[in-house]
Image (tube, rainbow, N blue to C red):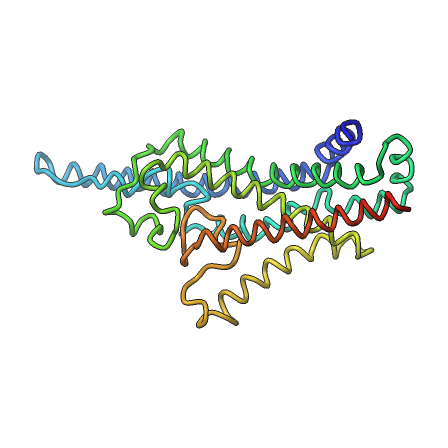
Amino acid sequence: MLKILKCELKRAFSSKLFWVALLIGIAIAAVSAGQNLSSYFEGLEMEANRAEYMGDNPYNPMNPMTTVYNYWIGGDYEGPMTPLFYLLMPLLVCLPFSWSYLTDRKSGYINQSMVHIRKKSDYFFAKYIAIFLSGGVIVAVPLILNILAIACFIPAYHPDIFYEMYYFMSFHDMRWLFYTNPVVYEIYVILQAFIFAGLFAVTGYVFSFFIRNRFAVILLPFLCIFGAQYLQDVALYSSLNNLCISPLDFLRAYAPLHVDMMVVALWAAALLVLTLGATWLRGKKADIL
């Protein structure tokens, strides 16, 4: 399996569409960083004028209000780039390679590959891993570059619970980690985004087992996630009692609604079981045939 895995990884990460999707994500992250840094420097100028006006009189600079943790794209609850990035996530991760099974079957590449492997199912699991990793990288890299860029200019003041209105963390189950160790919390947010991005990508891959249309394979995971957003914001809004059930919201570093980790875990488990199960069944069928 290692040989076919290396081949699939090379195909996934050398694809032109992989770089297109990655550059789109980086561009959104760069615009977000530019907007937030501009806002930060404007705030510094206002703070300098305030300090000059106050003179030697003591005053509270409110440093925890302005920290890297609420200015990076994951924790920015005011700027337009954060919702745009997470909205496009399911599309960007499926764009490069989720549909590749369709073209492999059409071109005859599958038959050529299976000549060199012991089990036909190895092809399907190798492609699963390659698609998962490529999807995760497309989302994680822009997030990492954004927070590093912000950290170069904005101090990482430790979050203070007395300034909670500036973090939007009141309804998050991981609120305790954010206030005790914010660096670990941001790593958790990026890792969580990586995992879900990979799961969204392999969801498109599984759709390609049953659908022959390349554009449908790319769009269907997005439509499913957007459907969950519609249920949360419209159809079931009054019944959910402020509970967040949409990945477009709970993957962010702040909590517009109550982020229950049980909901997050159920989403991850359901996507993992369904995609791995479908891939195993497809590979088993191929082995029998």
Q: Of 282 and 241, which appears nearest the observer?
A: 282
Residue at the spot 56% in from the left edge and 62% down from the top edge: 228
Residue at the spot 33% in from the left edge and 44% down from the top edge: 176
In the rendered image, which quarter contains the N terminus?
A: top right
Query: Residue 120, located in which quarter of the rendered image?
Result: top right
Side (left or right) of 248 relative to 213: left
Residue at the spot 16% in from the left edge and 36% down from the top edge: 52
- x and y, in percent, of residue 20 in the image: 67, 40
- x and y, in percent, of residue 234 in the image: 50, 70
Residue at the spot 63% in from the left edge and 56% down from the top edge: 222
- x and y, in percent, of residue 136 in the image: 60, 39
Query: Residue 183, located in which quarter of the rendered image?
Result: top left
Q: How many marks?
A: 0
In the rendered view, tell whether residue 212 sits above or below residue 120. Answer: below
- Residue farthest toward the front in the current orientation of the protein: 288
In the rendered view, tell whether residue 49 sits above or below residue 78. Answer: above
- Residue farthest toward the left in the current orientation of the protein: 57
- x and y, in percent, of residue 180 in the image: 32, 38
Q: Of 181 and 281, which appears nearest the observer?
A: 281
